[in-house]
Amino acid sequence: MTTASLRKPSAPKELMLSIHVVTWNVASAAPTVDLSDLLQLNNEDLNLDIYIIGLQEMNYGIISLLSDAAFEDPWSSFFMDMLSPLNLVKISQVRMQGLLLLVFAKYQHLPYIQIISTKSIPTGLYGYWGNKGGINICLKLYGYYVSIVNCHLPPHMYNNDQRLEHFDRILESLTFEGYDVPNILDHDLILWFGDMNFRIEDFGLLFVQECITKKRYKELWEKDQLFIAKKQDQLLREFQEGPLLFPPTYKFDRHSNNYDTSEKKRKPAWTDRILWRLKRQPAKANPSGFLLTQKDYVSHMTYSISDHKPVTGTFDLELNPLMSVPLITMMPEYLWTKENDMLINYTSTPEFLSSPWDWIGLYKVGMRHINDYVSYVWVGDNQVSRGNNPNQVYINISAIPDTEEQFLLCYYSNNLHSIVGISQPFKIPSGFFLREDTLSELEPQL
């Protein structure tokens, strides 16, 4: 194996993460367009660490749901195709009928992200149908609790009270018993977005259209139902939102930038929103250092496959990591191959609780998701030595053809439902075997 640094990996004392949030009601459309602009892939000055993508109204007919259960749904596959070449891995997803929530992160952050839970909260027909409601991914990011919610609230101007009721019901349903922070309102960060369906009250269609044409958006804010509700509700007021400096994102004629020209002529509205709530005070007042700054909040008018325009928000998250050393340190500098097996050395921190169901996966660089391994081994089955640090385990590589591609090793914790250790990229040299005269000094301690 190629030799890597002997220095143990650790997180810096101060860290800046760049996070890109996408919300889009795709109105059952398939991913048939280039999404580079939506994902900010053309922005060379932007180096994104985490993508959070929420879709609403994905096609959820019976045939589609059966197909998506057996295979990857088209949208998830499309996003993985675009992000995996940039070393971004899908680390979690949750789906409820037409709602989909995806989280991607760069390799170097994987050992510092623990998936706590995924939840679905249906609020549709009779309170049980999943065409409306919210889906949630709760995770720990460098030791901080982060809850992510993608929602689809009831439509129509007259349903504003019902929208607010559903918002409260979703919020109240997100409890995390068994964890040291069971209440979502005690989490360090809540990112809440989706098709919230809030409308513009009082103003007539012609006045709204005139304000949009002349970019007098501020006049419309005053009658935005969410803007009004935040004035009246203390908890809702704690959720922040950037200024709406883009035109209302609903309702458009498909394949155009024209607002609704059908007989109904629905009044334009900012239905698609991105909110956030910080528990901690700004870094100046809080020595732990946890500060979120929104850098961009825009709609993307070029996409017209839906009657909604997608909305994105880009954030800088500045934090002092509460978790600075990964639970598992993979040691590719001590990898050796013999016959069809590769011997892997790794160390664990004293607080790490292993499970018989932990496994180590061998991945090609550019992997799409956590199950996208080329080979794996159950740690308990193929263990050679344990408890002395380093631990040793062997993995069969006979099915892997000779290649110049680079690989990664990842340790997956069954207890934490997350990758807790990752190696540096390395190559498996063609025809490399242990020499007989080195066996005695390199043979694992049984």
Image (cartoon, rainbow, N blue to C red):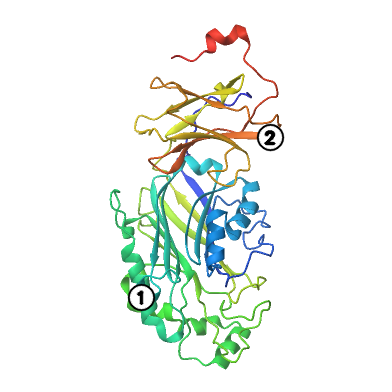
- 405 lies above or below 390: below
- Residue 139, position in %: x, y? 41, 50
Which residue occupies 59% across, 26% down? 4
Label 2: few (<14), some or many (≥20) within 10 Å?
Answer: few
Q: Please state the horizontal and vertical placement of residue 132, each as a whole percent of the image.
A: 43, 71
Residue 305 visible in the current orientation: yes
The residue depicted at 41 percent of the width and 22 percent of the height is 386
Position of residue 29 in the picture relative to residue 355 (left or right): right
What residue is shown at x 59% (from left), y 88% (from top)? Answer: 209
Q: Is residue 82 left or right of residue 134?
A: right
> Which dot, 2 or 1, sits closer to the camera?
1
Residue 214 in view:
no
Q: What amino acid is labelled 1 in the image?
A: Tyr
Residue 199 sits above or below residue 87 on the image? below
- Tell me the residue at 62%/54% (across/down): 46
The tag earlier along the polypeptide, 2 or 1, is 1
- Nearer to me, 403 or 222: 403
Circle 2 sits on which residue? 405
Q: Tell me which amino acid carries mark 2.
A: Glu
Task: Tell me the SS state at disc 2.
Answer: loop
Residue 376 marker: none
Whether label 2 touches label 1, CB < 8 Å: no
Return the x and y of residue 268 as percentages of the image width and height.
55, 83
Left or right: 372 in relation to 321: right
Q: Nearer the viewer, residue 159 or 147?
A: 159
In front of the other: 91 or 225: 91
- Helix, strand or loop at mark 1: helix
Residue pointed to by mark 1? 126
* Quadrant (top left, top right, bottom left, bottom right) of the C terminus: top left
Label 1: few (<14), some (14–19) or many (≥20) C-alpha neighbours in 10 Å = few
